[in-house]
Image (spheres, helix red, strand yellow):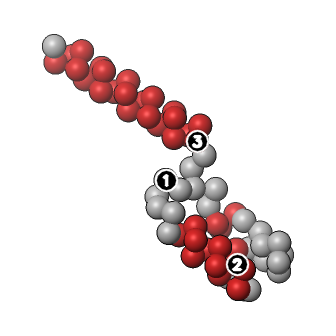
Amino acid sequence: MTYDRLVCANCAAPVSEGRCPVCRANRERMQHEGPFGGLNPMTLIALLAVLVAAVALLAHQTA
């Protein structure tokens, strides 16, 4: 999940606005997680399966 959809429990504002110290701290933490930090595990597994299928198809076509 991305921080632009989260609502802060401390101030009830969107975390992306950073109105309170809790919002700002969570926004910073989520920005440092990397590009795949916001994806859920099932999405990552699905992307991996698609990548493996594409590599297998490519290997089958070149053989």
Type of the residue with mark 2 = Cys
Instruction: Classify mark 1: residues with Cα within 10 Å, few (<14), some (14-19) or many (20+).
Output: few
User: As drawn, is 1 to the left or to the right of 44?
Assistant: right
Type of the residue with mark 3 = Pro
- Residue drawn at (53%, 56%), measured in percent from left and top? 37
Question: Quarter of the image containing the N terminus?
Answer: bottom right
- The image quarter in which residue 21 lies: bottom right
Type of the residue with mark 1 = Phe
- Residue drawn at (16%, 18%), measured in percent from left and top? 62
- Residue drawn at (59%, 37%), measured in percent from left and top? 42
Q: Nearer the viewer, residue 63 or 10?
A: 10
Q: Which residue is mark 1?
A: 36
Rendered position, 7 above or below 23: above
Question: Quarter of the image containing the C terminus?
Answer: top left
Rendered position, 53 above or below 12: above
- The image quarter in which residue 41 lies: top right
Distance in Å between CA atoms under marks 2 and 1 = 21 Å
User: As drawn, is 38 to the left or to the right of 7?
Assistant: left
Q: Nearer the viewer, residue 41 or 53?
A: 41
Q: Which residue is mark 3?
A: 41
**Does residue 31 show up?**
yes
Disc ID at residue 23? 2
**Does residue 17 show up?**
no
- Residue drawn at (65%, 73%), measured in percent from left and top? 26
User: If you read the primary sequence from the N terminus, does the residue marked by circle 2 or circle 1 appear first?
Assistant: 2
In the image as oriented, which residue stretches furthest toward the left? 63
